[in-house]
Structures are given as C-alpha cells and as structure tokens.
Amino acid sequence: MTDKQLPTWFDERIEAWLDDELSGSEAALFEARLATDPLLEREVERATRLGAQLQDLPALQAPSSLSRNVMEITGNTFALPKLAFPTWGWSLGGACAAALALMVTLGPGVLPGGEPELQPTAQELAKARADLALALGYVDQAGDMAARQLGGQAGALTVRGLLEPARRLNSDGADTI
Amino acid sequence: MRRLAKLLLTALLLAPLAAVAQGLTDHPGFVDFGDLDGIADVEPTVEVSLGPALLGFLRKTVANEDPELSSTLGKLRGIELRVFELRADQLDNARDQALSISKRLKSADWEPALRVRGGDGTVHMFMKTRDEIVEGMVVMIVESGGDAVFLNIVGEIDPEQLGSVASRFGVDLDDL
C-alpha cells in the first residue's frame, strides 16, 4: 500500500472548503492544489460522499418519552449549553455521534427496512398473544404425537421433556421416518 | 490521524446500518416458508407472522407480572406459522412438502430433533444450534386428520422455557 499523504494544511481544510469557510486566499490556494492533485481530489470526493450519506439519513421523530426521560436523568438541574459547530469537521463528527446515539437509543425501528416503532393497540397485542400461544401449542402437539408413538399416555409429553425422547426416537430408528 | 478517526467514525456509522439491514430473514434460525403458499392449491387457514417488534411489545406487557416469561419472550425474534386444512387426497402433497423442506434444512446444517410417523400423522422437528444454543426451531406436522402445520420459531430458544410459556398462556391442545 502506498502511503502517499496530503500535506497536513490541505488535509485539515477539506471540510472547511466544502463548507465554504476558507478565506479568499486560502480557497484559491486549496483549489489550485485540487486541480492538480488526484490524492486531494479523492479525499474531497470521499468527504463529499460521507456528507451525502449523512444527509440521506431519515429525519427522526424522537419518542415523546425521550425529553421526559432526559429530564428525569438530569434531574432538571441544568440547561444544555448552546452548541456551536465552527467547521464542517465538527459537524461531521457531531452528526456521526448523533446518528450513532439515535440508532443505539431508538433501535432498528427508525431506519428504512426496520419495523416501525408503532405502539400496537390492545387488540393487536391480544391477537399477538393468542397467535404466540397457538404456535407454541403446536410445538406441544408435536411432543404429544411423539409421546403417543412411544406408547406413552397422550398429553404426557410436553416440550419440557421433548428432547430426550427425540434423541431416543432418532437413535433406535424404529419409529422414525 | 484525522483520516483514521474519520474512517473509524464511518465504520462506526455504517456497522449498525449493516446490522439493521440484516432483518429476520437473515437470522440463522429463520426458514422461508414462502414456497408453501398455495400448498396443494389450498391457501393457509392460519397464517401468523410475529416479528421482533411485536414480540418486544408482548415482552413488555408481561415484564412486571412475569419476569421469567418476559425474559423468554425477549430472546425470541420471530414466529412464522402456516396451517392448512387439507382433504385426504391432498395430504401426500403436504408430506412431500415437509420432506422437501427437511432435506433443505439438513443441507443447511439443521439438526433433526424429532421424526415421527404414526397413526396420528407425521412430525418433523428440526433445530438450528450454534455453540449448544438453539437459534431456531422448525416443526412440521401433517395430521392424518387433515391439518398440515408448518412452524418456524426464530431466536434463542430454551425448549423447557418454551413449554413453560405455552402453559402460562393457557394453551389447550383440544382447541387446536
């Protein structure tokens, strides 16, 4: 791997140039270098892509409980200072940190493809509970059928004791398919 | 150094995105029952799909009254259930489907936990394990009476705990 590096001066001013925060002479110097240095061009493209990815993150609606939780944690003891982000670099770091914190805090539901964090209704929860019970009931039924095949009493075998009979069934082969 | 920090930040940013992109269908314990839709040209009479979000809400509803049950539910990632009511002449098709899925599971390193054929019907049970932890379970029942059941439980499963959950939810096999 070649380790050709940009001069620090240019490297440190990529974000500032993207944010149009360089002075006239600095911008001219930067752009003159950019026109002739493929390495600087690549770094600028990379920073631009990263910025675009951050821009593409969806706007998030914080849950209503968030502010209440924050106030409970802080005990209402202080006010948040007003933050200033003087350069694009700070914005980038801040955006990354904020995005990470939101993803960790809110989970996959906030992102495309994730399940939406919508509060189900009581009816939906009741149905889900019934569906879950039904599904687990079929696991029990499988155990029941195995127990009957073993000659045991119907209903005597539940999932609780399923694995050992399953091993026996599979080892002797007599009752297996 | 700044470049390294930027790369680290980028990696940190993208890693959760990749994890999120891997939904339930990418879980090692998930089995696609999609091919079953229309088994023997019969639509399922019962079709259940519980994802992690809904299971999470269920877990929360029982957290105070039953922490153990809540813990069990917290490890489940999904439930997929299809039940077909079939005529006698359609049962062979269901058995063929169960055998076909069994072969597919075996080739994907699922372990056969139970295979039964008797007067009641046939049962196939498979488990996907990693480091002795069950990550998924498939139960396929083709009853002689006409019901065909295809069930996939996704997530960390302790069979003993599952039995406990079923009993606490008051499952009555006679109602099935």
Image: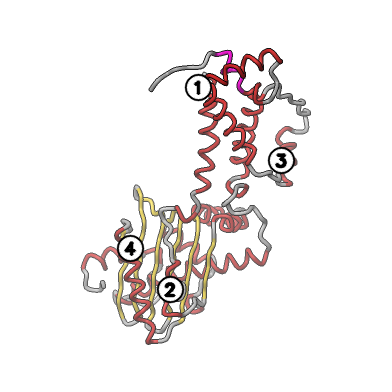
The quadrant in which residue A115 appears is bottom right
- Furthest-bottom residue in this view: B88
Q: Is residue A12 magenta?
A: yes
Q: Mark 2 belongs to which subunit?
A: B
CA gap, disc 2 and disc 1: 61 Å
How has the structure been colored for display?
secondary structure
In this rendering, position of residue A109 left or right of residue B108? right
Relative side of B107 to B69, left or right: left
Q: Are the two marked residues, 2 and 3, in contact with CB atoms closer than 8 angstroms?
A: no
Rounded to the nearest whole Å, what is the CA distance between mark 2 and mark 3?
A: 45 Å
Chain letter for the residue marked with disc 3 in the picture:
A
Amino acid type for the residue under numbered disc 1: Leu
Q: Which mark is in front, 1 or 4? A: 1
Residue A126 figure quarter: bottom right
**Residue type (three-letter) at the residue carrying disc 2:** Val
The residue pinned by badge 1 equals A39
Disc 3: which residue: A69
Image position, residue B59 (x, y; %): 58, 55
Name the residue carrying label 4.
Answer: B104
Whichever of labels 2 and 4 marks the residue nearer the N terminus, that label is 4
Residue under numbered circle 2? B149
Mark 3 residue element: helix
Majority secondary structure of the magenta segment?
A: helix
Residue A144: x and y, percent?
38, 73
Please tell me how crowded label 4 is: few (under 14), some (14-19), or many (20+) other residues with Cα within 10 Å.
few
Q: Are marks 4 and 3 in contact (CB under 8 Å)?
A: no
**x, y percentage for residue B150?**
43, 70
Mark 3 closeness class: few <14, some 14–19, many ≥20 residues within 10 Å:
few
Secondary structure type for disc 1:
helix
Q: Nearer the viewer, residue A49 or B79?
A: A49
Q: Is residue A63 left or right of residue A43?
A: right
